[in-house]
Amino acid sequence: VQLQESGPGLVKPSETLTLTCSVSGGSISNHWWSWIRQSPGKGLECIGSIYYSGNTNYNPSLKSRVTMSVDTSKTQFSLKLSSVTTADTALYYCARAIVAVGSSYFDSWGQGTQVTVSS
Amino acid sequence: SYDLTQPPSLSVSPGQTASITCSGDKLGDKYASWYQQRPGQSPVLVIYQDRERPSGIPERFSGSNSGNTATLTISGTQAMDEADYYCQAWDSRLVVFGGGTKLTVL
């Protein structure tokens, strides 16, 4: 399976960051799909995950600002992060999550897209 | 919140064994995964569920997890193994990553 992130590379403070991940080479069904970001100061951080049916699981530290959605007809899923600050500047990855009993890991990753928050 | 701690760096000579540790409270009661990230590239899963290797990952990569420590072992380390390595666990349905270990092969 291949994943490709898309979206604006520059977002103004207080605005909403919107990213889309396109899935190809495999089915979007029956899987969890995740957004993970990487910044020099905080390493890898899982923003949250969405099941193909629409169930979500968000990182509590970001939950109030995060909305994820999935469009199975387009084999895409999306991230909206509201009220961004410079602390949200990071490389954003989409990934496929494998969830089993007591286990969750990411077996496929996109190439990542850099998002900078600046006026 | 649950924390995973890794040493920031580790150096190893080519052909030697590299052991990268990841510490967390009762980590042995959870499953650990490991990712390799070469400069400018996306992370790649190298170990999942403590000791399972995905297809295409060389046999020199192995993992273990007991007590409070998970360990990624690279036997016969090669220059191409120079990268950042991250551990990851799942706690109360939350994904947690370690801070990463920079492996230098010299």
Image (spheres, grey):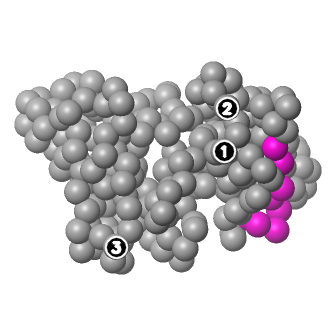
Magenta residue span: A62-70
Label 2 to label 1: alpha-carbon separation: 8 Å
Q: Is label 1 in a helix, a strand or a loop? A: loop
Q: Please say if A64 is above or below A107.
A: below
Q: Mark 1 points at which residue?
A: A30
User: Which residue type carries mark 1?
Assistant: Asn
Name the residue nearer the viewer: A70 or B20: A70
User: Which residue type carries mark 2?
Assistant: Ser
Left or right: residue A3 compared with residue B88: right
Left or right: residue A25 compared with residue B42: right
Q: In which quarter of the image is the C terminus of chain A?
A: top right
Frontmost of labels 1 and 3 is 1
Judge the density around disc 3: few (<14), some (14-19), many (≥20) Cα neighbours within 10 Å. Answer: few
The spot of residue B39 in percent (x, y) is: 43, 30
Q: Is label 2 in a helix, a strand or a loop? A: loop
Report whether residue A5 is seen.
no
User: Do callouts 3 and 2 mark residues in contact (Cβ within 8 Å)?
Assistant: no
Label 1 to label 3: alpha-carbon separation: 27 Å
Q: Mark 2 points at which residue?
A: A27
User: Do callouts 2 and 1 mark residues in contact (Cβ within 8 Å)?
Assistant: yes
Please tell me if label 3 and label 2 are on a single chain. no
Residue at the location (18% across, 27% down)? Answer: B78
Q: Mark 3 points at which residue?
A: B29
The spot of residue A17 in percent (x, y) is: 84, 45
